[in-house]
Amino acid sequence: MSTVSFPGIGLTIEVKEIAFRVFGWPIHWYGIIIAAGFLLAVIFCCKKADIYGIEQDDIMDLLIYAVPLCIIGARLYYIIFYLDLYRNSDGGLNFSQMVRIWDGGLAIYGAIITAILVALIFCKAKKIRFLALADLGSFGLLIGQLIGRWGNFVNVEAYGAPTDLPWRMGIYDTVNGVYQYMEVHPTFLYESLWNLAGLLLLALVVAKHRKFDGQIFLGYVAWYGLGRAWIEGLRTDSLYFFSTGLRVSQILAIVSCAAAVVILFVQLTRPHSSEELWGYQMAARKKAKARTAEQEEAGGAGDDED
């Protein structure tokens, strides 16, 4: 159990890493929170699937491959840039420690990169337009991220540098081998709120004025990259590019945000028609199939009368 406080507002919370046990096996709050975010993301995407021309069955089929691979991708991304954390005293790698994802250590960019690669392959195999699926999936990513960050809260991780701001978070943690009390930036909260704002912006504003497939996805990349760039700069547990002082996620966030903004600008200056949208085309195909079926049924009924 850990004590987390917000002294500026007089709030103190006792947090537990383990929620309960099943046959002696610990069920961690981190995993429960991640699972809750995933479930809500799937429900939301399934409800919006028709708008983007995506079948709910295709979403379920994609998840069969994407979920385990994204977990692996998120973990590998973290391990690669924090490899020294998983070494034994003799310098060898501790593989049993590498698989303990319930203790934290999942890098969201690793999951996003893996998700994009898996989706590209899946869309090609299923003959689905990737950018339409990416638009829909962007909502799922934001939902999963805004909820999943609370898993960092119960693990008392992903916090920022010391601060005296009114919303500072007071924690006890080991730094440089010393267990101590600190008042720090609650960066998990910053990112959760940033993703919530992004979700509302994309779902309530951008989606209503969507002109081309990929617009929401590009908006997500730009929004998340912008927020992650400044939030990452506040954190004390950043992944660095090997022995350099460059923060991996911050560099990736800045580059991806800039690229997305440029592409968005170019695309939005071009004329677009609603008929270009994959959702529009799929809806038109369904209507055509329905008319054909009605005509065939009517023709069959006429033959029966004769």
Image (cartoon, helix red, strand yellow):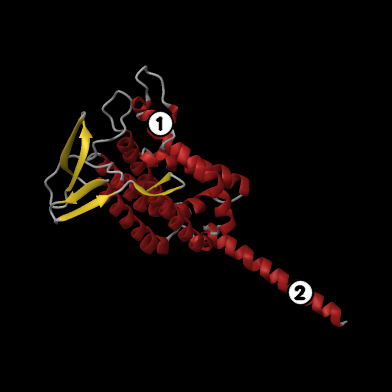
Q: Position of residue 277 (x, y in %)?
A: 52, 58
Q: Position of residue 182 (x, y in %)?
A: 16, 41
Instruction: Say above or below: 212 vs 291.
Output: above
Question: In the rendered image, which residue does mark 1 sit on?
Answer: 97
Q: Residue at x 36, y 37 (%)?
A: 105
Label 1 or label 2, whichever lies nearer to me, is 1
Residue at position x 42%, y 54% from top? 36
| Mark found first going from the N terminus, 1 or 2 | 1
Judging by the rendered image, the residue that carries numbered circle 2 is: 297
Position of residue 291 in the picture relative to residue 110 (left or right): right
Q: Position of residue 235 (x, y in %)?
A: 24, 39
At label 2, the amino acid type is: Glu
User: Foreground: 244 or 148?
Assistant: 148
Q: Quadrant of the C terminus?
A: bottom right
Q: Secondary structure at mark 1?
A: helix
Q: Secondary structure at mark 2?
A: helix
Relative to 119, is 203 above or below?
below
Where residue 199 sits: x, y (%)? 36, 57
Q: Residue furthest right?
A: 306
Q: CA distance from mark 1 to mark 2?
A: 63 Å
Depth order, front residue of 205/163: 163
Q: Which residue is at the front of the view, 90 or 302? A: 90
For image coordinates 68% across by 71% down, the residue present is: 291
Whether residue 107 appears in this view of the structure is no
